Amino acid sequence: MSSKTILVLGGGVGGLVAANELRRLLSSEHRIIVIEKNARHTFAPSFLWVMSGERQPEQITRDVRQLIRPGIEVIISEVQAIDLTNRTVQTGTQTLNYDYLIIALGTELNPESIPGLAEGAHTFYTFEGAAKLSNALQDFNGGKVAVVVSALPYKCPGAPHEGAMLIADTLRRRGLRDKIEVHLFTPEAQPMPVAGPALGEAVKQMLADKRIAFHPLHKLTQVDAAARKLSFDGKDSFDYDLFVAIPPHCGPRVARAAGLTNEAGWIPVDRATLQTKHQNVYAIGDVTAISIPGRWKPDVPMMLPKAGVFAHAQAEVVAQRITAEITGAGATYEFPGIGYCMLEAGESMAGFAFGNFIAEPSPQIHLRQIGPVWHWGKILFEQWWLAPIGAKREMLRLALALGGKVLGIPIKI
């Protein structure tokens, strides 16, 4: 067996899981290299807690090297070019050859695509933005808060609704309950449409219970930061006192330049194997375009949501398939499409949505009743993810022993 080099582009959820699983499965003669532009890993699901003041920024960051197995090489540099013909990747410091390539670069945010958005909006979709928004919420003295999904698609489909509820809860704790209005706008017809109408209605009820006004089918077209006014396509404008945006998302520039993406800027992959149309090149996580059963509109196929739980599962599948091919064992592993999400509602309460997103004829998603157990489940997962690699096995064993009976469903971490 000849030595192979596997490059993993990106040190987010998908990239770290893929690299760790490959290192666990493959002998040391094979090189596994992670290329990540940031030396510090930030745990994105906790950005909402930074926003609400429940976490300090330093509590949700770790050195990338703390989160990977020994024997994995880490290059802190930005990927500048992918050459599929010559099987090379150019970083800011060197050119690397690969036998296998895993693209886990996530998404890029593009607020400039909507006039005035970059100048007028806060956001909890970035590490820095969540910290700034936390300060803004502490200084806010009342008025209208607009939480706006500015474009589709966006990562973490539950986050806008969580964000609106946590903003309402944060301001309520400051004694502003009767001095604020919180409004959630989205281009979608319902919350989390891929999950079906029943879950959408359940999330709408969660919002209503928090006195949050839900405005579906609102496509943002312009922001007037000076006048504090939002304009929507075919809808009335809205005057705000605090504006929080989920910015437009786009695929990574380097993937588009390499010719890997479709017209929308995402990388199409085989739903079962995560392989691109190029040999030995895989893509996982938010960067991908994966169609699933069902239709969002009569002529628009539904796409798999962009969420860390899917990146995690896809990373395991790709690592197993590459290992099987290298060792000659035969690759049979396929992405199962199972996903779940703890939906934070404030007051240390959360809901829990889970199901099969590739079930026929449409995704089968369920929502468990709001309660404190789901909130604590999210905290446990946060602590497990941020733990040094050597401590994860024992933490996982204890968490599964405790949580498996409580949840009553099989959850693989």
Image: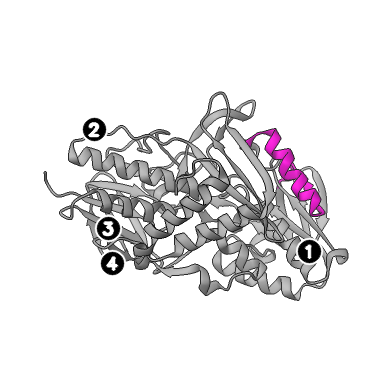
Viewer-nearest of labels 2 and 4? 2
Viewer-nearest of labels 2 and 3? 2
Vertical comparison of 365 with 238: above or below:
above
Q: In whole angstroms, how far apart are the C-alphas of marks 2 and 3?
A: 24 Å
Identity of the residue furthest to the left in this view: 1
Q: Is residue 189 visible?
A: no
Question: Which of pointers 2 and 4 lies earlier in the amino acid sequence?
Answer: 4
Answer whether residue 88 is magenta in the image.
no
Residue displayed at 49% across by 44% down: 411
Q: In whole angstroms, how far apart are the C-alphas of marks 2 and 4?
A: 36 Å
Mark 4 = which residue? 93
Label 3 residue SS:
strand
Would you call the spot at circle 2 few (<14 residues within 10 Å), some (14-19), or many (20 or more)? few
Q: Which region of the structure is painted magenta?
A: 195-219
Mark 2 = which residue? 330
**Residue 117's image quarter?**
bottom right
Q: Nearer the viewer, residue 110 or 152?
A: 152
Q: Amino acid at mark 2?
A: Gly
Vertical comparison of 246 with 303: above or below:
below
Mark 3 = which residue? 33
Would you call the spot at circle 3 few (<14 residues within 10 Å), some (14-19), or many (20 or more)? many
Q: Quadrant of the N terminus?
A: top left
Q: In whole angstroms, how far apart are the C-alphas of marks 1 and 2?
A: 59 Å
Viewer-nearest of labels 4 and 3? 3
Q: Amino acid at mark 1?
A: Arg
Question: Which of pointers 1 and 2 lies earlier in the amino acid sequence?
Answer: 1
Label 1 residue SS:
loop
Question: Which of pointers 3 and 1 lies earlier in the amino acid sequence?
Answer: 3
Label 4 residue SS:
loop
Mark 1 = which residue? 228
Question: Which of pointers 4 and 3 lies earlier in the amino acid sequence?
Answer: 3
Q: Nearer the viewer, residue 46 or 217?
A: 46
